[in-house]
Amino acid sequence: MTPDYWQRAAVDLAAGDERMAELVERYAGFALVSRGDAFGTLARSIVGQQISVKAADAVWQRFTAALAEVSPAAVLAAGEAGLAGCGLSRRKSEYVRDLAAHFAAGRLDPATWGALDDEALIALLSEVRGIGRWTAEMFLIFNQLRPDVFPLDDLGLQRAVCMRYFGGEKPPRRELAAFGERWRPWRSVATWYLWRSLDPLPVEY
């Protein structure tokens, strides 16, 4: 699913920023795409923490093979013993099971998230062990397709901004936050284009 606001956002960003306009033109025809399944996306983000993409893909394949389906019920039914052979660390196994418990108990219910603003949803997701602010922000951008998330702690975003706007010098976090205000209410879209300036392949999360 592609956001219905994408074209409007691209036009607005290009109109006010020559460097952004160059990226919008270069990557015309590409956009964010949501994987859709909230539980699966969050579980995969936990699996992939602090390991390479290749290693994460291998662990994820073993994880999905160990389950009848990627669902909270299946994870809880498998338990610690059922996940032991997937390549997950003990801590990550705890995190994934805690995530499943939150979904199963209704503490995380995607049907209610539309009523929450970005900060409220980030706070809710961060109640799960193993999900911090960065992971929650990536989820808001790539799964929920929220249009105005600006992940200040993301190294790719920091690098792209310093290369394109600060002559290679890394701005302080507060200055980066202030600089990003120029892209409201489309900071997720601006971030996506800045990521593309480092890697032309569209990111999926």
Image (spheres, rainbow, N blue to C red):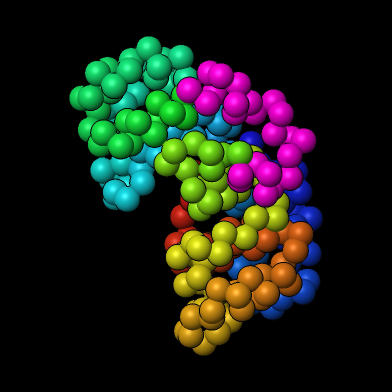
- At 48% from the left and 22% from the top, the residue drawn is 101
Q: Is residue 6 above or below residue 144?
A: below
Query: Count the marks: how many?
Result: 0
- At 47% from the left and 65% from the top, the residue drawn is 156
Q: Is residue 77 left or right of residue 137?
A: left
Q: Is residue 175 left or right of residue 55?
A: right
Image-quadrant location for residue 109: top right
Image-quadrant location for residue 13: bottom right
The quarter of the picture where the N terminus appears is top right
Whether 71 is among the magenta residues is no
Residue 98 in the image: state x and y as whole percent: 43, 28
Residue 185 in the image: state x and y as whole percent: 76, 59
Nearest to the observer: residue 101 or residue 83: 101
Q: In this view, does 116 lie to the left or right of 157?
A: right
Residue 59 in the image: state x and y as whole percent: 28, 34
Can the viewer see residue 126 in this picture?
A: yes
Residue 100 in the image: state x and y as whole percent: 46, 24
Image-quadrant location for residue 44: top left
Q: Is residue 15 above or below residue 50?
A: below
Whether 106 is among the magenta residues is yes
Q: Is residue 193 above or below residue 172?
A: above
- At 54% from the left and 79% from the top, the residue drawn is 172
Which residue range is magenta in the image?
101-123
Can the viewer see residue 26 in this picture?
A: no
Q: Is the magenta stretch mostly helix, strand or loop?
A: helix
- At 76% from the left and 48% from the top, the residue drawn is 5
Nearest to the observer: residue 51 or residue 172: 172
